[in-house]
Image (spheres, grey):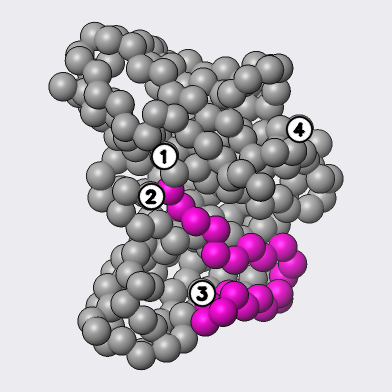
Amino acid sequence: GQQLNQSPQSMFIQEGEDVSMNCTSSSIFNTWLWYKQEPGEGPVLLIALYKAGELTSNGRLTAQFGITRKDSFLNISASIPSDVGIYFCAGQLRVSAGNNRKLIWGLGTSLAVNP
Amino acid sequence: NAGVMQNPRHLVRRRGQEARLRCSPMKGHSHVYWYRQLPEEGLKFMVYLQKENIIDESGMPKERFSAEFPKEGPSILRIQQVVRGDSAAYFCASSPANREGSGNTIYFGEGSWLTVV
């Protein structure tokens, strides 16, 4: 099925470092969503983006909806140990009558933080 | 404001038995999605439902799997005659009604872990 290109696949960083990950697609999306998943838990929504060029922050997290509508990035500043987890991007095609709104997912970025 | 509620959180079934997973969407949400996640893998879309309608079941295996979202009550994902390969985490998500031309946020439950022995 359709899938987003998410990179990097994994990251191992020192506490306090900044982190950047991104997703790209060949399709144009109407919505970009970023989720974090920890072991044994469901994905938790971090940031939702609805407009091209939109830049949104949630605490130390910042995400942007690319101008082309085909990409998005997520930055985490000053990482801490509890940032450990798998970060997923998900895109949603333009909503119109009759469209289903299932998400297209990236394969995730696994983040490890060394205290 | 309760989130997406799934139960059971953990379910163990013997090969050949049936598994039923339930999902109550967030209050005010009329769209439900089911995803499957195998260990060390991403989420795989299974089915998308609105009340009493299956909108997209392109990710559902053709046999043994079925889903419903009745007018009253939770959405049910049913797996008949389970096999070991069905062992996975099954996540339900919900979103509010469609808004023409705009995106909607999708919220996930904490998942149901199925183990087939």
Determine the residue positioned at 77% across, 40% down: B98
Chain ID for label 4?
Answer: A
Kind of residue at badge 3: Leu
Residue A74 numbered mark, or none: 3
Looking at this rendering, what residue extends furthest in the left direction?
B117
Mark 1, Cα crowd under 10 Å, few <14 / some 14-19 / many 20+, is: many
Residue mark closest to the camera, 4 vs 3: 3
Residue mark closest to the camera, 1 vs 4: 1
- Whether labels 1 and 4 share one chain: no
Residue highlighted by disc 1: B111
Q: Contact (CB < 8 A) between labels 1 and 2?
A: yes
Mark 2, Cα crowd under 10 Å, few <14 / some 14-19 / many 20+, is: some
Q: Secondary structure at mark 3?
A: strand
Residue A41 numbered mark, or none: 2
Q: Secondary structure at mark 2?
A: loop
Instruction: Find the distance from the CA under tag 4 to the CA under tag 2.
Output: 32 Å
Magenta segment boundaries in residue numbering:
A42-63
- Tell me the quarter of the image containing the C terminus of chain A: bottom left
Q: Residue A108: image x %, image y %?
A: 38, 60
Q: Is residue A105 visible?
A: yes
- Whether labels 1 and 2 share one chain: no
Determine the residue positioned at 57% across, 24% down: B75
Looking at this rendering, what residue extends furthest in the right direction?
B100
Looking at this rendering, what residue extends furthest in the front direction?
B1
Q: Residue B27: image x %, image y %?
A: 70, 38
Residue mark closest to the camera, 2 vs 3: 2
Q: Is residue B28 left or right of residue A77?
A: right
Q: Residue B28: image x %, image y %?
A: 74, 38
Mark 4, Cα crowd under 10 Å, few <14 / some 14-19 / many 20+, is: few
Q: Secondary structure at mark 4?
A: loop
